[in-house]
Image (tube, coloured by chain):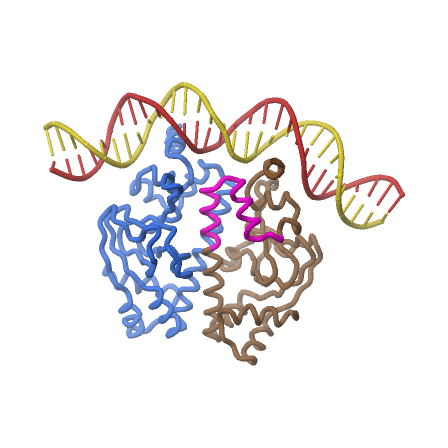
Chain colours: A blue, B brown, C red, D yellow
Amino acid sequence: METKAILQQHIAKTAVLTEEEFDYFYSHFKPLSFKKGQTIISAGDKVNCEYFVISGCLKAFFINDEIKMYILQFAMPTWWTSDYSALYNQTEATINVDCITDAEVLCLSNEDREKLCKEYHQVEHFFRWRTNKGYIASQKRLLSFMNNNVKARYEELLALYPQLYNLVPKHLIAAYLGVSRETLSRLYNS
Amino acid sequence: METKAILQQHIAKTAVLTEEEFDYFYSHFKPLSFKKGQTIISAGDKVNCEYFVISGCLKAFFINDEIKMYILQFAMPTWWTSDYSALYNQTEATINVDCITDAEVLCLSNEDREKLCKEYHQVEHFFRWRTNKGYIASQKRLLSFMNNNVKARYEELLALYPQLYNLVPKHLIAAYLGVSRETLSRLYNS
DNA sequence: TGGGTTACGTGACCTACATCACATTCTTTT
DNA sequence: AAAAGAATGTGATGTAGGTCACGTAACCCA
């Protein structure tokens, strides 16, 4: 499917826009292509955009003491990602975003999002629902962290995103689960 | 300050409503009073409302295996709480909400929120921002969970909400930090 | 005002997971 | 196809925090 159609279908699930309205909406997105391993946002950067994934897989992660990595989110097609704290508060990024595979994304600036939200009630509606879903998912993950051990969290993750098992290296899955790669390795070899 | 004025001031930070618009908006909220220890939402309930805290302190929590409690959120004045997953997906509650102290809240039904969002672009704008802040806070807490040990999380919590130390019993703070009360006790006696 | 419940402190012991170290395989790159 | 670099497996050992057990102090409320 074409880039534009992917976004259109995604939006149509929660917002009603005419063809012309969507064209206008779409005209604010900038398509970008990245190679595996390329960086999209580095900690310390000024963050000006959020990203809608068309193809490939990104990760949003935090690096602690320049040593340990914790993955906040894997971003797959039709997912949105950015350092939202930095984006909304206009502060420096503390989160990094880079490409696990080659990827195509659509980039939307903070100003354009706010402008579009203002111009179209339906766009504001869409972004409210999108954020809402993110919030609920985040709360759920928080609970899982408190309540479940590593094994349960691992199984939960693979049940939710079976494609991850083959797509991303195991040490990244460990970094998402908040566990050492050694522990994860021992886990599924038993 | 009066109940109505508290909500009005809160909304005014992100949305512009005329006096008449706000009156109409406010007419959808139902004021409720609760005593310390009273339950607002129990796991298994049908959830139909979200709650805006006027005074007092609530907790939103999850009970695991009918034994361990994990606190997702303390809700203080001007905070919103509910089981949002159950509320938006119209499923049974998995989260409980009850009162740590006597409390006054304003109750808004799911249908009324959606109606108001539809009727007033500014209301939709307000709820988008509110959820956005919640999402960012939730992501931050998730990171803290992965990155920090109990001591650091405890200090972070008290730095953010100093009033909690005197307001809520220590075992509830432990339940928020996702740690046993014994460990927390040993922590600040050293 | 006293008896029962809830909150809190502390010792002894246990366990899940981290860390370090090194071996093995798989994947790029040239 | 060889060399270098990632990714993975696995043993030995350390440790933060959990669990159990018991004691004391604080707070209801009848």
Q: Is residue B121 above or below residue B177?
A: below
Q: Position of residue B180 (x, y in %)?
A: 59, 38
Residue, far front: B190
Determine the residue positioned at 45% across, 74% down: B121
Determine the main secondary structure of the stretch shown in magenta.
helix
Q: Position of residue B103 (x, y in %)?
A: 67, 59
In the image: residue B173, left or right of residue B85: right
Q: Position of residue D27 (x, y in %)?
A: 76, 47
Number of numbered discs: 0
In the image: residue B8, left or right of residue B169: left
Q: Say which of A160 and D23 sits in front.
A: D23
Can residue B94 be spotted in the picture? no
Where the C terminus of chain B falls, by quadrant? top right
In the image: residue C9, left or right of residue B24: right
Q: Is residue B152 above or below residue B113?
A: above
Q: Which residues are magenta?
A: B137-163
Determine the residue positioned at 61% across, 61% down: B77
Determine the residue positioned at 53% across, 72% down: B12
Q: Is residue B160 magenta?
A: yes
Q: Is residue B66 magenta?
A: no
Q: Position of residue B1 (x, y in %)?
A: 65, 69
Determine the residue positioned at 49% across, 51% down: A139
Can residue A73 be spotted in the picture? yes
